[in-house]
Image (tube, rainbow, N blue to C red):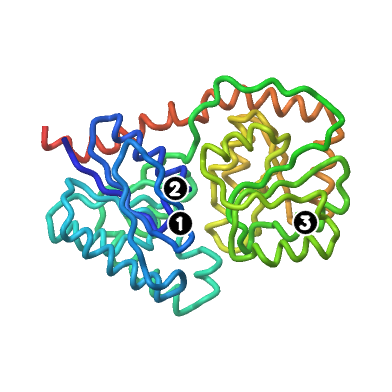
Amino acid sequence: MKQLIFTVTNDLNYDQRMIRICSTMVAAGYKVTLVGRKKKTSLDLVNRSFKQHRLTCFFEKGKLFYAEYNLRLFFYLLFAKFDAICGIDLDTLLPVYITSRLKGKPCVYDAHEYFTELPEVINRPATKKVWSGIANLIIPRLQYCYTVCQSLADIFQKEYGPHFEVIRNVPFSEKELPNKVKTEEPKILLYQGALNDGRGISELLSAMQHINKAELWLAGEGDLSEHLRTKTKELKLEKKVKFLGYVLPDQLRAITLQADIGLNLLENKGLNYYYSLANKAFDYVQAEIPSINMDFPEYQNLNAEYSCSLLLADLKVETISRSLNDLIQDEKLYDRLVQNCKLAKLDWCWEVEKEQLVRFYKKIFASDV
């Protein structure tokens, strides 16, 4: 039985994407270990079908965290057994590549982000230089790479050389949904994800002043958590905005099924956001709820296939409030998008997408058969 190791810098309990990937590879007959980090606030690990290992660091963020985590990851991998190893994003790729070379095993790169174009990277020239150096050193030497959308695949191949497969970050299908009864109760507007810079949350709070018969639920935490809670109080929106905090995947699924409209807002800060294809966009479709996305290339492509959302040209308060009010007040528009979600969810699900992942890893070991 082939052994795979996947490496991330996340807290493993909340990484829905890696839970899907690792579970799929176990079902396909592989032994799988997922390596991540343990924070001071981390809960006990949820039992999964795959092995999980968390590294504890003295530093929680910044340059010292990445340096320490990569060093600890290197020594863990140096003594670990594996037949192939996959680095998720650039922030774990260096120790993954070095240990794969030392052991003569395949190195896989899973580019979930356009890492060198993240806002927290492009705004720090020295930091960008370091990560760009790692990317330019390693990625051109790799044979096995994949990413989450065609836009990023094209960019990476042009920039670094290797071919990138596309394996989209889509959820498992939701086959049996609870019946929603139309009432006069406030509509639930749901944002799931990090409360970080560039996610449009501050603008969304301002827009809530102009939206009636609706509640905003924010599922997640981030760098702006304290600021956003303070702004909510300043705008006197405590009765219209709920901060749900960190939510485990199963809980998040239940919350999403309660929502009426999904939100996926991004500021055009760097190419990572512009060419993104967030998993939350698909989560909303599986829950059969219309959503608000940005008028960026990948969401344009989705809407060209199945029109399930309204696309925002910008993050102006009036633009956000106008689109949300349209969805809340125009029942024909809302119902049309719901029907499109019901069609799209049959194609945009992990049951379909996972076959590409399994084929990808079969190719790596094809010469061993």
- Circle 2 is placed at which residue position? 13
SS of the residue at dot 2? Answer: helix
Report the mark closest to the observer, 2 or 3.
2
Circle 3 residues within 10 Å: few <14, some 14–19, many ≥20: many
Seen in the picture, residue 242 relative to 359 is either above or below; the reply is: below
Q: Position of residue 130 (x, y in %)?
A: 38, 74
- Name the spot of residue 294 as percent of width and height, x first: 67, 48
Whether 25 is drawn above or below 321: the answer is above
Disc with the residue nearer the chain's start (1 vs 2)? 2
Q: CA distance from mark 2 to mark 3?
A: 28 Å
For the N terminus, the image quarter is: top left
Q: Residues within 10 Å of mark 1 (few under 14, many from 20)?
A: few
Find the residue positioned furthest to the bottom: 126
Q: Residue at x 32, y 56 (%)?
A: 161
Q: Nearer the viewer, mark 1 or mark 2?
A: 1
Determine which quarter of the picture holds residue 54: bottom left
User: Residue, x 28% and y 66% (percent of image)?
Assistant: 72
Q: Mark 3: which amino acid?
A: Leu
Q: Residue 120, percent across and down?
A: 53, 69
Give whichever of discs 3 and 1 has the lower sequence position. Answer: 1
Look at mark 3 in the image and give the residue it sits on: 205
Quote the CA–CA distance across marks 1 and 2.
9 Å
Q: Nearer the viewer, residue 239 or 273?
A: 239
